[in-house]
Amino acid sequence: MEIYILRHGIAEARGAWTNDADRALVPEGKKKLKAVLRVAKAAGVGPVQILTSPYRRALETAEIAAEELGCEGKPIRCDALRPGSEPEEVWAEIRGFKPGEQILLSGHEPLLSHLAAFLLGAPSLRIDLKKGSLLRIEMDRFGVQPRGVLRWYLTPKLAVAACKT
């Protein structure tokens, strides 16, 4: 199984909203996100399913990913991807997918970097997951304690540079 972890793009400032869940992506966030997804598509990313936090910015990110990557199904809202959730909750949601499938998760920090560390079997690993970044983990153990291999990590800065060449 290939798991793609996508942090939501740049969103409206926190102070503009009384409810954090309602913050939307800003145009710059959408632009950088699309650059990341174009590079990802060229690298063969084509998830069978996208799971997303129900928060607006993550949901918008997931919808853009579905469009850019040609994912046939609509993103599925997943409460385990809400801020404050634990990596084990997310793992419980995705363990049911088939070993050969690609899935993409759209959500928030610090959950996503903690999830990546958990999936890599290195819970103390620290990952600086930038907004709009995408990483690929290839899973080779699916038990209660998963084990995967980090194959790559793509930031918006790298993607924008790649799109200019």
Image: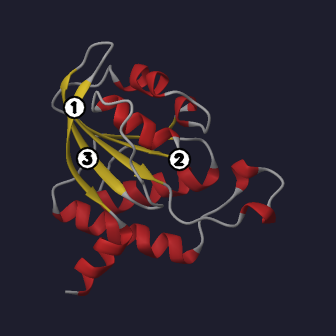
Amino acid type at circle 1 is: Gly
Q: Position of residue 64 (x, y in %)?
A: 44, 60
Residue 92 x, y percent position in the rendering: 42, 19
Q: Which residue is farthest right?
A: 18
Tags 3 and 1 touching, CB below 8 Å: no
Q: Which residue is under mark 1?
A: 148
Q: CA distance from mark 3 to mark 1?
A: 10 Å
Residue 121, picture quadrant: top left
Mark 2 or mark 3, whichever is nearer to me: 2
SS state under label 3: strand
| Mark 1 element type | strand
- Name the kind of residue labelled 2 in the image: Glu
Q: Residue at x 49, y 57 (%)?
A: 61
Reply above or below: 120 against 135: above
Which image quarter holds the C terminus? bottom left
Residue 28 in the image: above or below residue 88: below
Q: Determine the image quadrant of residue 47.
A: top left
Q: CA distance from mark 2 to mark 3?
A: 16 Å
Task: Point out which mark residue 109 bears.
Answer: 2
* Residue at x-position 49% and y-position 70%: 30
Which residue, given by chain and number where applicable, does mark 3 sit on?
136
Q: Earlier in the sequence, mark 2 or mark 1?
A: 2
Q: CA distance from mark 2 to mark 1?
A: 20 Å
Give 159 or 147, whichever is nearer the viewer.
Answer: 147
Q: Residue at x 52, y 27 (%)?
A: 86
Q: Residues within 10 Å of mark 2 (few under 14, many from 20)?
A: some
Q: Is residue 157 toward the left or the right of residue 112 in the image?
A: left
Question: Which comes before the other along the chain, label 3 or label 1?
Answer: 3
In the rendered image, residue 104, in percent from the top left (x then y), is placed at: 35, 43
Q: Which kind of residue does numbered mark 3 sit on? A: Arg
